[in-house]
Image (cartoon, rainbow, N blue to C red):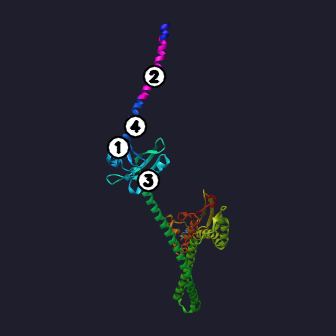
Amino acid sequence: MKKTTRHTGREQKFPAVSKSTRSLRRVRAGLENSPGRYADLYDNAPAGCFILDPDGRITSLNPASASMLGKERAGLVGKYFRDLVVKDDREIYHQHFEGVIREKGIRNADLRLAVDNGAQLHVRLASLAVSNDVGETAEVRTIVTDITDLKTIELETIKHIRKLQKTLQQQLSINNNLRRSNEDLLHFAYIVSHDLQEPLRTVASFVQLLQRRYEQLLDAKGHTFMEHIVEGTCYMQRLLNDLLSYSRVGGEDIARKPVSLQHVLEEIKSSFSEKIKESEAEITSDDLPVVQGDEVLFSTLMQNLISNSLKYRGREVPRIHVSASHGKDQWLICIRDNGIGIDPRYAEQIFLIFHRLHQRNEYDGTGIGLAICKKIVERHGGRIWVESQPGRGSVFYFTIPDRKKIH
Ligand code: ADP
């Protein structure tokens, strides 16, 4: 019994002692190996490691540093690190080194080192000053990482961004030039149409005088010629008036006030009452909204669209309906008629100035009405278009941004 107990006791005690001994041995072996390990880390580090004296002279460097610079390791010892830096970046290095000594913390700096073959290496320095027992700087340790690839990408990206900026600036200046020449053109149209009215009025009044005073002296041909002159002069006056209205829409600043489209429509109905009665036209509408903008311009817009619906009527009695719906940030206004319709091929052309689909003897007009409509809508920040088929009526749509909803 005794024997067994003693044996058991020894068996419990000995394994514990040998475990701690083993781990102690491991620690001691580790400690014995660590200088070697540090040396290995220093020699085979994937970055350059420099040790500098407090004046910035190289006292030691690892093989990676020398191969990075393409120089002999031994030849670099004793040299000033700053002499490895390209001239333009020496001030950066100077600030970096001074900072490291002064502030005793890790500092970084990006700069270029001169390589033997004349090339330059973009590097990132991470430096730390180590002090002696009395607090003076004993040495500066600097890790040098080659960031040439990163820098190349960065420089390429900057180059691309600069190129983009240049293109954008050119585009902006083209836009400005376009805007300016558009304004010049409108100004020119205004001056021309305004100034031509005066001599045209003189022509018109003298032709009328001729017609009245010398009517009996003219034969049948003379009368026809005279009629053509009067007609041409009147048409020219209308063209100049329309051109004047068109250039006016482009120029001045427009008002931004609440405008009731319902009210605008009622006014148009009363000013067209003769035409409506004559053609027995039916003009109906939904409840039309109050929009923000210029009342005179909205009135011109609706007037042009409704007078076209009356003018380009088919065989049936004209039926025109104005409706409105609210989208996300805008009103959509729609004017539907049962007139002759439009070939969809011309759906965009008809909004260009002087574009007409009919001869004057078929339907009278100057071809400016829809161009004015487009300008008015666009000046209010909206869009105008038509959906139509010949013989099936037309639907003109325009949008007006709802300013209350736009932040
Ligand atoms: P104008 O009526 O003086 O010719 P507009 O610019 O108002 O000039 O219209 C351009 C052309 O668009 C017209 O000549 C006509 O052919 C077509 N158009 C415009 N509105 C309608 C409509 N409601 N129905 C059919 N055609 C239309």
Give yes or no for residue 167 being in the magenta stretch.
no
Q: Which residue is mark 3?
A: 94
Residue 364 seen in this snapshot: no
Instruction: Say if 22 sits above or below 62 in the image.
Output: above
Image coords of residue 153 (percent x, y): 41, 52
Q: Residue furthest front?
A: 134
Q: Is residue 164 left or right of residue 383?
A: left
Q: Which mark, by number, is residue 92? A: none
Residue at (56, 87) in percent of width and height:
207
Viewer-nearest residue: 136 or 223: 136
- The amino acid sitting under disc 4 is Tyr
Q: Which residue is mark 1?
A: 63
- For label 2, the SS is helix
Q: Are marks 4 and 2 in contact (CB under 8 Å)?
A: no
Q: Which residue is mark 4?
A: 38
Label 4: how many Cα within 10 Å (few below 14, some 14–19, many 20+): few
Alpha carbon separation for disc pair 4 and 1: 14 Å
Q: Residue furthest bottom?
A: 217
Viewer-nearest residue: 376 or 349: 376
Q: Which residue is mark 2?
A: 19
State which tag comes first along the sequence, 2 or 3.
2
Residue at (52, 77) in percent of width and height:
188
Residue 250 seen in this snapshot: yes
Where residue 264 sits, quadrant-wise, is bottom right
Q: Is residue 281 left or right of residue 178?
A: right
Q: Which residues are magenta?
A: 7-28
